[in-house]
Image (cartoon, rainbow, N blue to C red):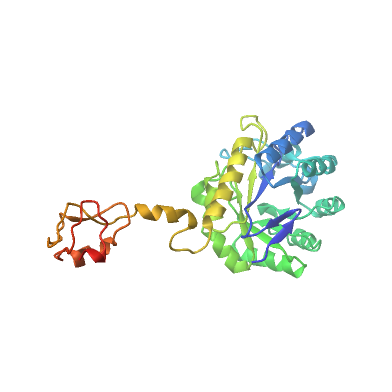
């Protein structure tokens, strides 16, 4: 599958996983903290910084009761209305250019998730290199068509979507001109449980839609992400925060900077380890062959002695005949004297 260019990075199976650090609302409405998060992401080795582009009025209604109120006791945001939550979590639009420029100065590719058509128009004015569609918007065909028409790569989280819904969404994207598509396996629960990750879906998605597949991950730690790379994920997106105990809106399921560093290192290690189908010695194993087992004379023998399990044994190192020849050699007559420690050879019989 062909690589996809995002900013100055090549994304694909021939390249280390593309690591996206998702800021979301973890700036706590402080642009100084937002820049500190960018510094931390760059220092940790992340490849990209992602924002979210919406206002409360572009994502929901100014209603604070019924289904617009989060009453679920298991929700991180229980007791908030959707409107108030998004008011707290939004990234002010007037920050975007400054944050994108700052991220770029730190070597990061910067882009965002638009949540409506006005956000797409705004982000186009900032010349973002690609678009990300959130799980909750992956069934919004008008939004999908709008980002596809830009001709830029599109990354789509698949959380909650059925196979049929994903097929419809991919059809919309491709019909509207999307050439470079990456689907992210995602569990839209915060925090998510590893048992719900169902990572075996990753190669199935890639085959089903003939596109690159990655992971948008809300589980604790980096283990799920490493496993995803082993199954072919080319992109990993994780929320991050300066301090998980800082009280920011998404802090509880976000990685701290040292964990982002671990994510970058361990997913690249997993990708490197995939290698290719290969049997036999690698270059580094050649020197180890001497320490394999082989057949050695285990007691002094004289010409005319019979080889037995006592005087011929399979031991290390590996300079004698292979152990598989032991049954064939037992009972054979030694034709020359051989002291203990002599590697067994055909010339001895």
Point out residue 162 in the picture as x, y percentages from the top left corner.
59, 61
> Quick one: quadrant of the C terminus?
bottom left
**Does residue 190 show up?**
no
Give the residue furthest to the right. Answer: 125
Give the residue furthest to the top. Answer: 246
Report how many numbered discs are placed on residues in the image: 0
Taking the image as shown, residue 306 lies to the left or right of residue 62, namely left
Residue visible at 62% across and 53% down in the picture:
16
Residue 154 or residue 195, whichever sits in front: 154
Q: Is the residue 337 above or below the residue 112 in the image?
A: below
Residue 147 or residue 129, whichever sits in front: 129
Point out residue 239 in the picture as x, y percentages from the top left corner.
65, 42
Q: Is the residue 285 above or below the residue 73 in the image?
A: below
Q: Is the residue 314 above or below the residue 240 in the image?
A: below
Taking the image as shown, residue 322 lies to the left or right of residue 170, namely left
Point out residue 320 in the picture as x, y percentages from the top left corner.
29, 59
């Amino acid at each position: 599958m062909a690589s996809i260019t995002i900013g100055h990075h090549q994304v694909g199976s021939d390249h280390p996983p593309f690591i996206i650090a998702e800021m979301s609302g973890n700036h706590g409405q402080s642009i100084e903290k937002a820049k500190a998060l960018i510094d931390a992401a760059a220092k940790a080795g992340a490849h990209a910084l992602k924002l979210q582009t919406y206002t409360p009025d572009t994502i929901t209604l100014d209603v604070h009761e019924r289904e617009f109120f989060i009453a679920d006791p298991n929700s991180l945001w229980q007791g908030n209305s959707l409107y108030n939550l998004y008011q707290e979590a939004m990234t002010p639009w007037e920050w975007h250019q400054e944050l994108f420029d700052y991220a770029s100065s730190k070597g990061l590719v910067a882009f965002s998730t638009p949540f409506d058509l006005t956000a797409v128009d705004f982000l186009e004015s900032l010349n973002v290199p690609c678009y990300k569609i959130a799980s909750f918007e992956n069934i919004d065909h008008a939004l999908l068509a709008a980002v596809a028409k830009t001709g830029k790569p599109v990354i789509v989280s698949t959380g909650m979507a059925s196979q049929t819904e994903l097929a419809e969404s991919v059809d919309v994207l491709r019909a509207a001109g999307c050439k470079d598509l990456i689907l992210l396996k995602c569990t839209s629960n915060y925090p998510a449980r590893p048992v719900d990750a169902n990572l075996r879906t990753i190669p199935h998605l890639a085959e089903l839609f003939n596109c690159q597949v990655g992971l948008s991950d809300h589980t604790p730690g980096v283990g799920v992400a490493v496993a995803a790379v082993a199954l072919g994920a080319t992109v990993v997106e994780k929320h991050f925060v300066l301090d998980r105990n800082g009280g920011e809106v998404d802090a509880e399921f976000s990685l701290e900077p040292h964990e982002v560093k671990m994510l970058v290192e361990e997913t690249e290690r997993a990708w490197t380890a995939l290698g290719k189908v290969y049997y036999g010695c690698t270059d580094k194993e050649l020197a180890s062959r001497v320490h394999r087992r082989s057949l050695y004379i285990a007691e002094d023998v004289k010409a005319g002695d019979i080889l037995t399990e006592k005087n011929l044994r399979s031991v290390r190192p590996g300079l004698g005949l292979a152990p598989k020849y032991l049954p064939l050699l037992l009972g054979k007559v030694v034709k020359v004297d051989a002291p203990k420690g002599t590697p067994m050879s055909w010339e001895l019989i």
